[in-house]
Image: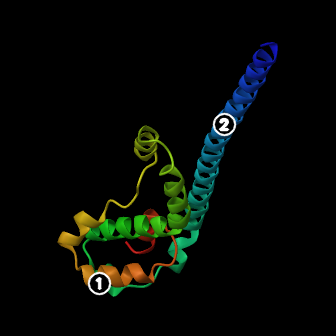
Amino acid sequence: MEKNKNSGAVFFRHLCSFGGVLLLSACSGIHQERAGLTESYQAYQLQRTLCVQQAGSGSQVFPQSEWLKQLPQQDKQEVLAYLSVSAFNQCVRRAKQHFDQQVRHQSKDVQDLIFQLVPEHDFYIENISKRLDTKELRQLKQQVSQPFRVSDMLNRNP
């Protein structure tokens, strides 16, 4: 009988140890997921910063466009804002995709919170496509090679 008590205690200790290992593994997995999320967010933020820095010289490499020059000032501002946002989105695209992929591994509540706090920048196309020649706009968009500041472009091409 004494032997059975010891066997039960040993079995219970092994069971607890195994449960502890499972718990630690689960916690470690959560920590790794959060670390991946944190690292991908930091990489995304770093890429955003680099893209903003690139925008400082973007007007120097902006393509010439007779179509853009001929637009009324209000339309020109809208087109430039759209192209600027589009170029910025393109610049951060890979880092943002990696971050989004890491977010998808989180719970639905965490995903909703993150997508609410981390802004999307692609918002201009709906307003612009209805009023302006989208063929010319698409051609110009394909020629834009880096982010730029709208204000720099307006000062350069008033």
Q: Is residue 150 left or right of residue 102?
A: left
Q: Residue at x 31, y 71 (%)?
A: 76
Q: Residue at x 37, y 72 (%)?
A: 158
Residue under label 2, please give it: 22
Q: Are marks 1 and 2 in contact (CB under 8 Å)?
A: no
Residue 144's spot in the image, x, y percent? Answer: 46, 78
Residue 102 visible in this rendered orientation of the protein: yes
Judge depth for marks 1 and 2 and give the one in front: 2
Front-most of residues 119 and 38: 38
Q: Is residue 21 left or right of residue 132?
A: right
Q: In the picture shown, does residue 7 fall above or below 85? A: above
Q: Quadrant of residue 7?
A: top right
Q: In the picture shown, does residue 86 fall above or below 108? A: below
Residue under label 1, please give it: 136
Q: In the picture shown, does residue 125 fall above or below 134? A: above
Residue 55's spot in the image, x, y percent? Answer: 54, 66
Front-most of residues 30 and 92: 30
Q: Quadrant of residue 132?
A: bottom left
